[in-house]
Image (cartoon, rainbow, N blue to C red):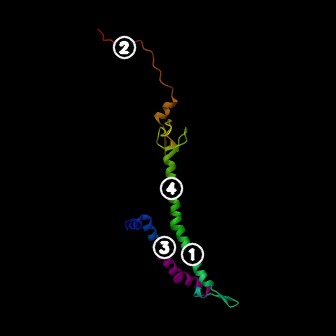
Amino acid sequence: MTGFRKFLVRSNLVDLSVAVVVGVAFSNVVQALIKDLITPLIAALGGKPNFSNLVFSINKSHFRYGDFINVALYFLIIAAVIYYFVVVPANRLTTIATRNTEAAEHPCPECLSHIPAAASRCKFCTAIVEPYLNGHRAHSPTADASQRRPLLRRPTSRPLTSRPRS
C-alpha cells in the first residue's frame, strides 16, 4: 500500500492530473465561448442563428456540417491559445537559456571542451586560455604570461653567498 501511495503523490502524476482538470475546465470555457458568443456573431453576419442546425442531404442521408463548423472553431481557438500562451513563451525561455549558456561558456582552443567564460585555464587540459567577459576576450595576466619571454636575470658583481661584513 505504501508503494501505491508513493506512486499517487509523485510530482509527475499530480502535475498530470492538474493539467487534465484544467484542460477539461478550459475546454468547457471555450465551448461556451463558441456557442454563446462566436456563433451568434457569425450568425448575425451570415443570417443563421445556430450552426448545429445546418444540414444537407444526399439520398436521404443527412450531413450535419454545422456541428463540424462548431468543432472546427473550438479546435482553432484551443490551438491558438496553446500556441500563444504555452509554445511561444516556452520557446522564448529556451532561447534565453541557450543564449545565457553560450555567454557563460566558450571552447578551449586546445581540447575544444566548453569551459566557463571567466576561466583563465582549461579545467580539462589545463591549457592557459584568455578569459571572455561579456562575449569579448578580456585582458588576463596569466594568458599574457604564456606569450611573454621568460625574464632573464642580470649578472651581478656580488657573490651569490652572503658573508657578514666585518
Q: Amino acid at mark 2?
A: Thr
Q: Secondary structure at mark 3?
A: helix
Tell me the distance, in whole angstroms, between the alpha carbons under discs 1 and 3. Answer: 13 Å
Residue 118 vs residue 28, the one in the foreground:
28
Q: Earlier in the sequence, mark 2 or mark 3?
A: 3
Tell me the distance, in whole angstroms, between the alpha carbons under discs 3 and 4. Answer: 28 Å
Q: Which residues are magenta?
A: 23-48
Residue shown at 46% from the left, 34% from the top: 142
Q: Secondary structure at mark 2?
A: loop
Tell me the distance, in whole angstroms, between the alpha carbons under discs 1 and 2. Answer: 93 Å
Q: Which residue is mark 2?
A: 161
Residue shown at 50% from the left, 48% from the top: 103
Q: Which residue is mark 4?
A: 96
Q: Indicate which label's residue lies in the foreground, 3 or 4.
A: 3
Can you give x and y, in whole percent of width and height, for residue 71 in the image?
Answer: 58, 79
Residue shown at 68% from the left, 91% from the top: 60
Circle 1/circle 3 CB separation < 8 Å: no
Circle 3/circle 4 CB separation < 8 Å: no
Q: Amino acid at mark 1?
A: Phe
